[in-house]
Image (cartoon, rainbow, N blue to C red):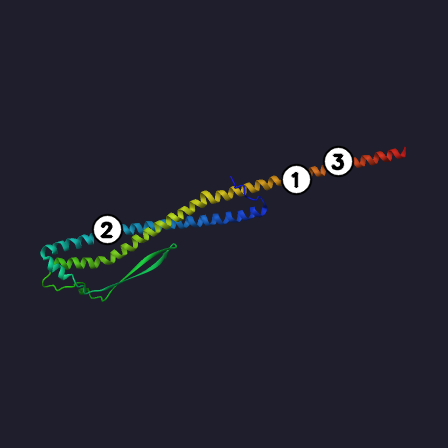
Amino acid sequence: MPSTTINPTRMELTRLKGQLKTAQRGHKLLKDKRDELMKQFMDVVRENRALRARVEQALMRAHGSFTVASALMSPEMLEQSLMYPKQSVELDMTFENVMSVNVPEYHFRTQNDDQSQIYPYGFAQTSGELDDAVSELSGVFQDMLKLARIEKTSQLLAEEIEKTRRRVNALEYVKIPQMQSSIKYITMKLDENERANTIRLMKVKDMILKDALEEKRAATAQAAAASN
């Protein structure tokens, strides 16, 4: 049922038809965006699942090696070995636009590319399992950053999908039906007014013809009386 504040004029009808056309075009674009976002989201979820499994396996291996090293080395020696790192890293963050969603991109850089710099200790008094743990953690760090980016991307895409879905539903089930109902209401009112005007003009025409006929009869009667 259209609002009672609608002004049933041709100008208002033209304006509503233009708004309806724009709303329908926007509805189609938003549906296409929602479908593409869903496709992107499912790709990210699959990548996230595979990468998470790989990271968890690497962390379990690192944890196992560190547990063995902790059993073979004294706590003091273990703490002293890892107290002063030799390698330093820098982490920068930029953003990439994916379907109007700004997702983070992490850029990881080490001070130098020498792989031996990841070990902040000498090899004489440490366990080989500690070397394995440090090497495993160094290798998995890039995957952990990638996993953080992917999980944040999936979160942002899910939020954008929900917002887009609400907009699509608002247009499909509220705005567009309201406009269509208002256009139908105005069209019916204009047709009704046109029929009323037509009937009024026909009545006026009948009255004019009736008056003209009566005047003709009166004139004929006067002429007949005058001839007599």
Q: Is residue 191 left or right of residue 101?
A: right
Q: Is residue 127 visible?
A: no
Task: In the rendered view, tell whether residue 182 sits above or below residue 157.
Answer: above
Residues at marks 2 and 1 touching, judged by CB atoms closer than 8 Å: no
Q: Is residue 50 left or right of residue 219?
A: left
Dot 3: element: helix
Task: Give the x, y percent position of residue 57.
Answer: 20, 52
For label 3, count other residues whose C-alpha is less than 10 Å away and answer few (under 14), some (14-19) or many (20+): few
Judging by the rendered image, the residue that carries numbered circle 2 is: 53
- Identified by mark 1, the residue type is Thr
Q: Quadrant of the C terminus?
A: top right
**Distance between the alpha carbons at the discs numbered 2 and 3:** 96 Å
Judging by the rendered image, the residue that carries numbered circle 1 is: 198
Dot 2: element: helix
- Depth check: give the residue in front, 145 or 85: 85
> Which residue is pictured at 17% across the width and 59% down the height?
134
- Identified by mark 3, the residue type is Lys
For label 2, count other residues whose C-alpha is less than 10 Å away and answer few (under 14), some (14-19) or many (20+): few
Q: Residue furthest right?
A: 228
> Which residue is pictured at 25% across the width and 58% down the height?
142
**Distance between the alpha carbons at the discs numbered 1 and 3:** 18 Å
2 or 3: tag closer to the N-terminus: 2
Q: Is residue 197 visible?
A: yes
Task: Give the x, y percent position of residue 14.
Answer: 56, 48
Residues at marks 2 and 3 touching, judged by CB atoms closer than 8 Å: no
Task: In the rendered view, tell whether residue 38 sits above or below residue 111.
Answer: above
> Which residue is pictured at 85% across the width and 35% down the height?
222
> Which residue is pictured at 83% across the width and 35% down the height?
220
- Identified by mark 2, the residue type is Ala
Task: Give the x, y percent position of residue 26.
Answer: 46, 50
Question: Which mark is in front, 2 or 1?
Answer: 1
Judging by the rendered image, the residue that carries numbered circle 3 is: 210
